[in-house]
Amino acid sequence: MKWYSQLKQDVFAFENAKTKSYIEIGAWKPEKYSNTYLLESNGWRGFSLELDTGKIPEWKDHPVRKNRVYWTNALEFDYKKALEEQGMDTHIGYLSVDIEPPQNTFAALKRVIEQGITADCITFEHDKYRNDVDYDPIATDFLSQHGYKVAVRDVFRYKRNRDENGTKIINKCYMETWYIRNDIDFIETDYETWVSENK
């Protein structure tokens, strides 16, 4: 399967969501590294949020992306009202939460859940590799209280650097944790294993 997201979040959602709908918090570009381009291309309904209005021309001129984008602050947004506007149910297939910094990502996640919205699966970017506060266990604890379990842990990308001697160093940068509803049959796994099984 051709994928467009940075870490195959779109494949995870495509394969595990029972409902073909999404909310994407932090849309950035319409296609490159998009968590939802694959989904919309396959007929999924949904909407995205993006604060950077400089990206509007790319979205406006894209031949595929027709689902709504709200150019607004995710921490002040009325998600339930937007679902009503789009004729969507409060239960969706996929929730993608990826803004900056991680405390805002977590605040946006809480805002969605506390408005009574549920999802089959969730990808949450905590960027623990570059932050003092680790929002991974914070988000896991919060979501475990709302009917979710960890599906894929230790989601990472490689970062290539050189040490003081010029020797190449490759580090794993742990960026996300993916979740799924408790009532969906999925055995928790780590990212490397999941990728090897979803080539």
Image (tube, helix red, strand yellow):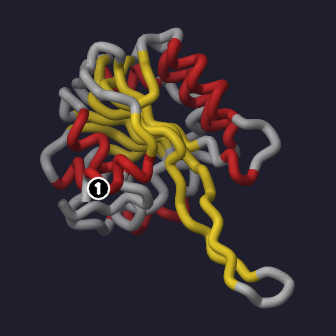
Drawn side of residue 129 relative to residue 180, left or right? right
Q: Amino acid at mark 1?
A: Tyr
Farthest left residue in view:
43
Q: Quadrant of residue 92?
A: top left
Which of 37/74 is in front? 37
The residue positioned 68% from the left and 45% from the top of the image is 128
Label 1, residues with CA under 10 Å away: few <14, some 14-19, many ≥20: many
What residue is shown with label 1?
Answer: 37
SS state under label 1: helix
Q: Give the residue displayed 48% in from the left and 14% down from the top.
A: 115
In the current view of this chain or complex, which residue is farthest to the right? Answer: 164
- Residue 139 point in image, percent of width and height: 60, 26
At a point 21% along the width and 61% down the height, the residue shown is 64
In the rendered structure, the answer to whether residue 22 lies left or right of residue 151 reads left
Residue 198: x and y, percent? 26, 53
The N terminus - image quarter: bottom left
Residue 155 located left or right of residue 136:
left
